[in-house]
């Protein structure tokens, strides 16, 4: 077997890492396209202020600590899992329900007069930012009329917020703020149409 003399062996080209190749217009375009492609996967579609609790009570707060944080004697607890109180969120009167699992807070539920929906919606938009999706439901009302029920949803890695113009009754709206595993997005009974839009 004949071996090549050193002088005849192909020489590897030394790479000069200190000298960058000039960016031609076509290379610049491809860098931009690839960059936008990567950013599209990394950047969240609708950033929002994901809550780590409700009104100063972090997720996992105990019942006793919740009572101390709310600084109230009106919080009535039904066992160790659920507490209720008539209070306000901003200027909106609400019936507040706090759900506890394994001794810690996992969800706050607000039931409010539906006539105050716009006020609470504005408060939530200021507090949490733009919703990640909006759901329009058509629900049957008196004599078969269909009523539009706007539902705003903020969905994050750990927590979710859902605000409904109408809950199970047409004179009451409902909001839930809590850990994703405990907040349900399911429609109330009687919904005949759902349209979801994601900004």
Image: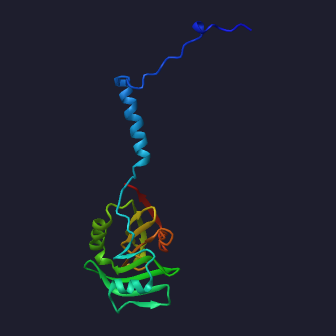
For image coordinates 27% across by 66% down, the residue present is 126
For image coordinates 45% across by 61% down, the residue present is 157
Is the residue 70 above or below the residue 35 in the image? below
Q: How is the image coloured?
A: rainbow
For image coordinates 39% across by 39% down, the residue present is 36
Quadrant for the N terminus in the image:
top right
Where does the image place residue 160, in percent across and percent down from the top left? Answer: 43, 67
Looking at this view, name the residue that lies furthest to the left: 91
Q: How many marks?
A: 0
Residue 87 placement: quadrant: bottom left
Of 76 and 103, which appears nearest the observer?
103
Of 9 and 172, which appears nearest the observer?
9
Looking at this view, name the residue that lies furthest to the right: 1
- For residue 194, side relative to residue 172 (left or right): right
Quadrant for the C terminus in the image:
bottom left
Instruction: Work out whether residue 171 can be spotted.
Output: no
Is the residue 25 above or below the residue 66 in the image? above
Where does the image place residue 60, in percent across and percent down from the top left? Answer: 46, 76
Of 146 and 70, which appears nearest the observer?
70
Where does the image place residue 123, in percent across and percent down from the top left? Answer: 28, 70
Residue 150 placement: quadrant: bottom left
- For residue 20, side relative to residue 180 (left or right): left
Where does the image place residue 196, in percent across and percent down from the top left? Answer: 43, 59
Instruction: Work out whether residue 96 can be spotted.
Output: yes
């Amino acid at each position: 077997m004949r071996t090549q003399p050193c002088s005849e062996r192909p020489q590897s080209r030394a790479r000069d890492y200190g000298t960058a190749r000039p960016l031609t217009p076509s290379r610049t375009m491809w860098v931009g396209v690839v960059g936008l492609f990567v950013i599209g996967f990394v950047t969240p579609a609708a950033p929002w202020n994901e809550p780590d609790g409700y009104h100063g009570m972090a997720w996992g707060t105990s019942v006793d600590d919740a009572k101390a944080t709310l600084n109230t004697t009106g919080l009535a607890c039904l066992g160790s899992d659920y507490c209720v109180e008539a209070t306000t969120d901003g200027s909106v009167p609400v019936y507040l329900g706090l759900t506890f699992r394994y001794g810690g807070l996992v969800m706050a539920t607000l039931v409010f007069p539906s006539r105050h929906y716009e006020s609470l919606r504005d408060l939530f938009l200021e507090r949490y930012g733009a919703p990640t999706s909006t759901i329009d439901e058509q629900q049957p009302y008196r004599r078969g009329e269909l009523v539009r029920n706007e539902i705003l949803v903020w969905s994050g890695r750990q927590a979710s917020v859902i605000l409904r113009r109408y809950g199970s009754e047409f004179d009451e709206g409902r909001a839930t703020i809590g850990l994703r595993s405990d907040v349900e997005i399911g429609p109330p009974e009687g919904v005949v149409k759902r349209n979801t839009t994601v900004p």
